[in-house]
Amino acid sequence: MPVVLKVLSGPAEVAATAAERFLHRMVAAQGRGEVPHVVLTGGSIAEAVHRQIAQQAPAHDVDWSRVVFWWGDERYVAPDSPERNALDAREAFLDVVGAEVVHEMPSTAGAPDVAGAAAAYSDLVRSSGAGEFDLVMLGMGPDGHVASLFPGFPQLDVDDAIAVPVTGSPKPPPERVSLTFPALNRTRAVWFLVTGAAKAEAVRRALAEAGNVHETPARGIHPAPATGAGETTWFLDLAAARSL
């Protein structure tokens, strides 16, 4: 299935549009009798999307007890650290709508070290996952990284694990847990949420016909559900799309 580009005026329109589509997707999935499994991401545009979902949710008939939430990556820090992606998501969205099934990645209180945190999350996906995700939402850094899969890092080549530890991250904090490409790609749909001129060159590289995943990790995202073709949609603002 071809990649779909949604180029919108600015971050506010990206957030509002993605939120509305998210809610419609959840309603449709539940209408088919499904319990959708969704992978969340962090970052400023993700927080804006989360706030828009919470704001628009009353107009949509989503049973939040029947949506399962996961994470594409997380910072291995204390559970109450403001660096935790999960704290922002809970405050902006999950606690507001009353989400009940939220599988956070372990903090320093939940695992003895970052390798143990990755192993524990892998086990959780195996035991409580649905075999594939309905939707994976991803941001992208100016360097082209997605989740916590950074350019040139060995985690880009891991194909036999669900989640991996990351140390020496070029973005603080240095220790993180990330889903691998095989895990992220086991999904029906991927949505990239990308805004800002600083990311325009990385967007161009990610969508170019040729390129290297070690230079631009976003190129490694290719949704491959168990049946059918996966969907890839880029929600971009004008600034992020200016080099296309």
Image (tube, grey):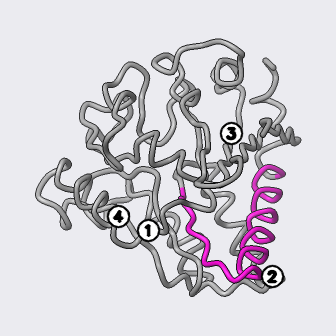
Quarter assignment of residue 142: top right
Answer whether residue 188 is magenta in the image.
no
Amino acid type, label 2 = His
Q: Of 92 and 127, which appears nearest the observer?
A: 127
- Given this view, does label 2 or label 4 mark the residue nearer the observer? 4
Residues at badges 3 and 4 in contact (C-beta under 8 Å)? no
Crowd tier of the residue under label 2, counting other residues whose Cα lies within 10 Å: few below 14, some 14–19, many 20 or above: few
Which stretch did the figure color magenta? 13-40
**How far is the residue under mark 4 from the one under mark 1?**
6 Å
Residues at badges 4 and 1 in contact (C-beta under 8 Å)? yes
Lower sequence index among marks 2 and 1: 2
Q: Which mark is residue 129?
A: 1
| Above or below, comparing residue 163 to residue 198 in the picture | below
Q: Position of residue 154 (x, y in %)?
A: 31, 25
Q: Secondary structure at mark 3?
A: strand
Q: Position of residue 69 (x, y in %)?
A: 51, 69
Q: Secondary structure at mark 2?
A: loop
Residue designated by label 3: 194
Q: Which mark is residue 60?
A: 2
